[in-house]
Amino acid sequence: MTFFRNISYKKNIAYLFSCAIFFIITSCEEDLTKNKGKENKNFPSQIINNANIIQRDSGFVTMRAKAPIIEKYELIDSPYTVARKGIDIQFFDKKKPKIPGTIKAKYAKFYDYKKFYEAKGNVRITTNEGDRFAMQSVYWDQIKKSIYTRDTVYVTRKDGSTLIGAHGMRAKDDFSEYVFYQNSGDFATPQISESKK
């Protein structure tokens, strides 16, 4: 009798042990599935060190960009490209190919699908005409061809006149037109010669 009790007791222990192993394996599989669903994809798919990028349109160079490092995040729902250590861009106009405009900033980000740029930190823009803009941040909506900021904007025109937009500005992306908010400045006026009597 004791012998059969020991056998059935051992069978019960083996059965319980098997059940425990089954539940442990099943719960591990569930955890692995959950982790796969929450897998982090927000990491750079491309990293370019000492980047020197040239963009052309029908053979004409439209832009040159230099940055210490550029990272592309392409595996997420809203892909973007970022230059965390600053960027220096030259942009060219076919009418004035030898006089590029420039944009310099300590940080820049480009959203691929939205065609939307942002630049931050000591932003400096010089137009093809020679006008210089200084601000802390600027945003460029490439689809709407609009550039804007809510930061104070300091402008020095090529004729020496200055302008301050205390509450930002909105401009066409070629700077052919711009509007300043609560502006003040010192404008150069043409000299009018008096006729001799």
Image (cartoon, rainbow, N blue to C red):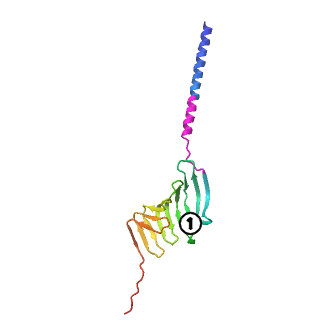
Instruction: Locate residue 21, reporting x and y percent.
Output: 59, 25
Residue 197 sits above or below residue 10 on the image: below
Instruction: Locate residue 99, reporting x and y percent.
Output: 56, 72
Amino acid carrying label 1: it is Gln
Residue 69 sits above or below residue 91 on the image: above
Q: Answer few, some or many: residues within 10 Å of disc 1's Cα (few below 14, many 20 plus, some between 14 and 19).
A: many
Q: How many numbered marks appear?
A: 1
Instruction: Locate residue 137, reporting x and y percent.
Output: 47, 60
Q: Quadrant of residue 163?
A: bottom left
Element marked by disc 1: strand
Left or right of residue 66: residue 147: left
| Residue at (49% x, 71% y) in the render | 131
Disc 1 marks which residue? Answer: 90
Q: Nearer the viewer, residue 173 or 89?
A: 173
| Residue at (52% x, 58% y) in the render | 107
The residue range painted magenta reads 26-45
* Quadrant where the image shows the N terminus: top right
Left or right of residue 146: residue 36: right
Residue 84 sits above or below residue 178 on the image: above
Q: Nearer the viewer, residue 150 or 98?
A: 98
Residue extending farthest top: 1
Q: Is 142 included in the stretch rendered in magenta? A: no
Q: Quadrant of residue 4?
A: top right
Q: Main secondary structure of the magenta part?
A: helix
